[in-house]
Image: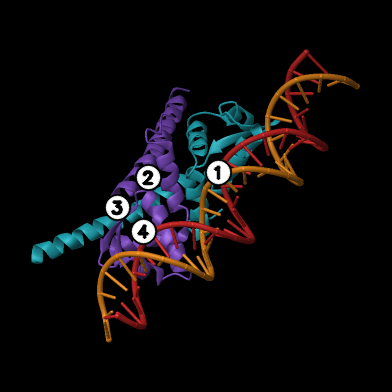
Chain colours: A cyan, B purple, C red, D orange
Amino acid sequence: MVVDKLNDADLDRLFQAFADATRRDIVTRVTTGEYSVSGLARHYAMSFAAVQKHVAVLERASLVTKEKRGREQIVRAHRGGLQRARRLLDAYEAIWRQRAERIADILAQG
Amino acid sequence: MVVDKLNDADLDRLFQAFADATRRDIVTRVTTGEYSVSGLARHYAMSFAAVQKHVAVLERASLVTKEKRGREQIVRAHRGGLQRARRLLDAYEAIWRQRAERIADILAQG
DNA sequence: CTATTCTACAACCAAATGGTTGTAGATAAG
DNA sequence: CTTATCTACAACCATTTGGTTGTAGAATAG
């Protein structure tokens, strides 16, 4: 899947995926260890189906992938989404720095 | 939570705020130029009230502030929110690197 | 003063979100 | 084979979201 160019809908899904504490926690877990969907579900005070939905949201945002192993579905972190989110925030940061420089210039020449 | 030393609700609001193309565009605009709420509204194919709500979402997420000037309300970028979002994604990135090192160690000693 | 502009906010609506329970199919375990 | 486990998915519900229109007040312009 080529996901270099980000459209609005991709970014919407990406940040939406981060906008929930349970999902952020799932991302942390699957980055550091190996979890099936039910393995994840055991850690949260909600139904299996609810966790399943959270994983689906992360999957659509390209933050995790699933891989079938026997009767389990192993959830793995997928770095692509994270990197794209970081890139966007870095872009905002760059705009900020540009602005700061511009202001500094104005002050310097004023 | 290991990664998440920031308040969950704050982070929810922060990423939720980024999860909309109009709001991301507003952030860009107010970082590079000076805009009133109605000045912003002129650029979007939606009502003034809708833009007003988007600005309110950004305000609650600490991504912008408003300052009254005459009968206008000037919207200004506020760096705090952006920096907190970046910090969180950097933390995830750090976890990734840790994991990569761990795997490299295992491979090296295996 | 009067008219216009800018903002705030309420009320409303459709769609999305985050949760639930229930059903059913695969796979593993006894 | 039978039972338990893991997953998928549908149906449902309450709340939130993203939009609308309408009303009202404050500040500016003429």
Q: Position of residue B4 (x, y in %)?
A: 40, 34
Question: Which residue is pictured at 43% across the width and 33% down the height?
Answer: B100
Mark 3 is on which residue type?
A: His
Distance between mark 3 and mark 1 Cα atoms:
28 Å
Q: In front of the other: label 1 or label 2? A: 2
In this view of the protein, which residue sits in the foreground, B23 or C21?
C21
Mark 2: give few (<14), some (14-19) or many (20+) Cα within 10 Å. Answer: some
Q: Position of residue D4 (x, y in %)?
A: 75, 20
- The mark found on residue B27 in the picture is 4
Mark 2 is on which residue type?
A: Ala
Q: Label 3 belongs to which residue?
A: B78
Distance between mark 4 and mark 3 Cα atoms:
9 Å
Tell me, yes or no, whether the two marked residues, 3 and 2, touch with CB atoms within 8 Å: no
Q: Position of residue B11 (x, y in %)?
A: 41, 42
Mark closest to the chain's N terminus, 4 or 3: 4
Q: In front of the other: label 3 or label 2? A: 3
Residue A82: image quadrant is top left
Q: In front of the other: label 4 or label 1? A: 4
Mark 1 is on which residue type?
A: Leu
In this view of the protein, which residue sits in the foreground, D27 or C19?
D27
User: SS of the residue at dot 3?
Assistant: loop
- The mark found on residue B85 in the picture is 2
User: SS of the residue at dot 2?
Assistant: helix
Question: Which residue is pictured at 43% across the width and 51% down the height?
Answer: B17
- The mark found on residue A58 in the picture is 1
User: SS of the residue at dot 1?
Assistant: helix
Side of A11 relative to B71 (left or right):
right
Mark closest to the chain's N terminus, 3 or 2: 3
User: SS of the residue at dot 4?
Assistant: helix
Mark 4: give few (<14), some (14-19) or many (20+) Cα within 10 Å. Answer: many
Distance between mark 1 and mark 2 Cα atoms:
18 Å
